[in-house]
Image: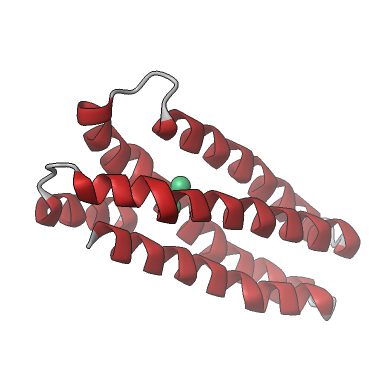
Amino acid sequence: MIKEFMTNDHRECDQLYAPLEEALNGGDFEKALELFIPFKNAMLGHFAMEEEVLFPKMEEFIGGGEGPTYVMKMEHNQIKTIIDQLGEAIEKKDQKKALGLGETCMIMTQQHNMKEEQILYSMAEQLPLEKEKLLEEMKKVWKR
Ligand SMILES: [Fe+2]
Ligand SMILES: [Fe+2]
């Protein structure tokens, strides 16, 4: 259930990038900036659901330290840096840079998401978490 919800949210984030890439390819920076906002919000909202709700709950069982949730948080920070750089490149109307950063962002995100979908979310499903409650809490964080 958590796995399904979060996997779907990964797809929704991906889908928000496609029209942004299209606008960048067409050199429409005004539109790109408009489309960048919902993309960024969706990515940050997803990371917040994980960092503020899912990961701390999982860490109660699997421990924190330098374990799997720590690695995921480091990757979030790397992806956030790329997203910020992408926003700057769009503002500067630097098409080549923006497209390159967008591609890097997508590759890093795909690799990250695959690890979560194949390992981390499956692990969450195995843990004795109050899943309904957890989902409600995650949705609240996202809407913020
Ligand atoms: Fe993540
Ligand atoms: Fe995720």
Q: How many marks?
A: 0
Residue 87 spot, x, y in % from top left? 70, 54
88 horizontally vs 93: left or right: left
41 horizontally vs 144: left or right: right
| Colour scheme employed for the rendering of this structure | secondary structure
Q: Taking 119 as reference, is 51 above or below it?
A: above
Q: Residue at x 56, y 38 (%)?
A: 75
Residue 138 spot, x, y in % from top left? 25, 52
- Furthest residue toward top: 65
Q: Residue at x 72, y 73 (%)?
A: 21
Depth order, front residue of 65/44 = 65
Q: Quadrant of residue 6?
A: bottom left
Q: Residue at x 21, y 47 (%)?
A: 126
Residue 23 spot, x, y in % from top left? 74, 78
The quarter in which the N terminus is drawn is bottom left
Q: Taking 77 as reference, is 34 above or below it?
A: below
125 horizontally vs 97: left or right: left
Residue 42 spot, x, y in % from top left? 47, 61
Q: Quadrant of residue 127?
A: top left
Q: Residue at x 20, y 29 (%)?
A: 61
Depth order, front residue of 65/15 = 65
